[in-house]
Amino acid sequence: MAAGLKTIIALSFVLAIGFLLVILSAALFHNYLTLLVVATYVIAPLPNFICAKCANPDDFMGDAGYAVVDFGRFVTGFLVVMGIALPVMLAHCALIQVPAMAMSIIGGLLIYGTIISFAQFFKEEQDF
Amino acid sequence: MESNRLFHKFPTPAWINNANVRTGGVYLSGAMFSLGFFLFLDAAVFSHSALNGSTIHITFVDWIPLICSTLGMTVINSIEKSRLNSDSFSYSGNGVAWKARLVLFLGFALIAGGLAGSVCVLVLNYIVEEAQGRTLWMGVANCLGNALVMLSCVVLWVSQNMEDDFQYTLSL
């Protein structure tokens, strides 16, 4: 309900721009290392999704689920920072150029933001 | 009161017992671990790139402190917190708390050993060899990376200890 047609169109535009930036950053400089950023940001929300399904945090009588949820959050935090740190590292070691780094970071953040927003909207719908 | 004595020496402010702060702490811990890991990975990649003009390279020996720190972090955060306080809950014989504290000590020793080892590598491989500038930075990055992993472990430990108070308010 909350996610109307306009929201979906806007999100898909943002996703397309994100992919465009990352692919350009790879293709313009003939150096395809920046595509790793896409892989990182696509993987980043997965641990949270999987661990949230594995554990049942509402069941506060048993505390076994917390460790799994925490592990998922830890890995998510790791991957999100990795998406920024990886291009910075590659640029610092002169494996890619600085403009490619900037483009891939911005593109990666756009992709990740889109995925998170989509997950948020789907969650809202399930609450009804 | 007696069962809680291990944590009584570290009083925590009131705002810290919040589910959102706890969640944020776990995310922050992952982020700091990632930062520490990539700080050192950057140094390792730099040492084998064309930019490194010196004869000093990062070898497996330089990786050992970080591996120790990561192992120690895994050990510390794998211990179930209730085991540290309770001898009365012993399912598997006597002295569970004592054994748990021994394992905890091993974890702390691994982390401290990692940090000390990184300083050792910095002194022996870089300062004694009179490395300058960006070459010296490779050794400093090793130390900083280990310190960040240690900080991340502290943040994760503190966040997980909030769990008890949070659950207590829930079950009320």
Image (cartoon, coloured by chain):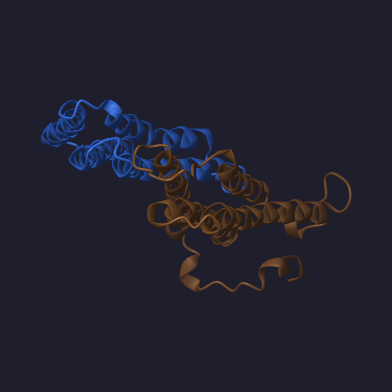
Residue drawn at (21%, 28%) of the image: A26
Is residue A109 positioned above or below B27 on the image? above
Residue drawn at (49%, 53%) of the image: B139
Specify whether A90 is left or right of A106.
Answer: right
Looking at the picture, tell me which residue is in the foreground, A33 or B8.
A33
Looking at the picture, tell me which residue is in the foreground, A9 or A83.
A83
Is residue B162 positioned above or below A72 on the image? below
Quarter-wise, where is residue B47 in the image?
top left
Asked if one can make out residue B129 in the rendered structure from this viewpoint, the answer is yes
Instruction: Give percent across and percent down for residue A8.
Output: 16, 32
Q: Which colour represents chain A? A: blue
* Chain shown in brown: B
Task: Report the number of discs.
Answer: 0
Specify whether A38 is left or right of B167.
Answer: left
- Looking at the figure, which quarter contains the C terminus of chain B? bottom right
Specify whether B9 is left or right of A120.
Answer: right
Instruction: Give percent across and percent down for residue B1.
Output: 73, 71
Residue drawn at (21%, 32%) of the image: A22
Instruction: Give percent across and percent down for residue B95.
Output: 86, 54
Looking at the picture, tell me which residue is in the foreground, A1 or A88.
A88
Instruction: Give percent across and percent down for residue B145.
Output: 49, 52
Asked if one can make out residue B81 in the rendered structure from this viewpoint, the answer is no
Is residue B53 positioned above or below B111 on the image? above
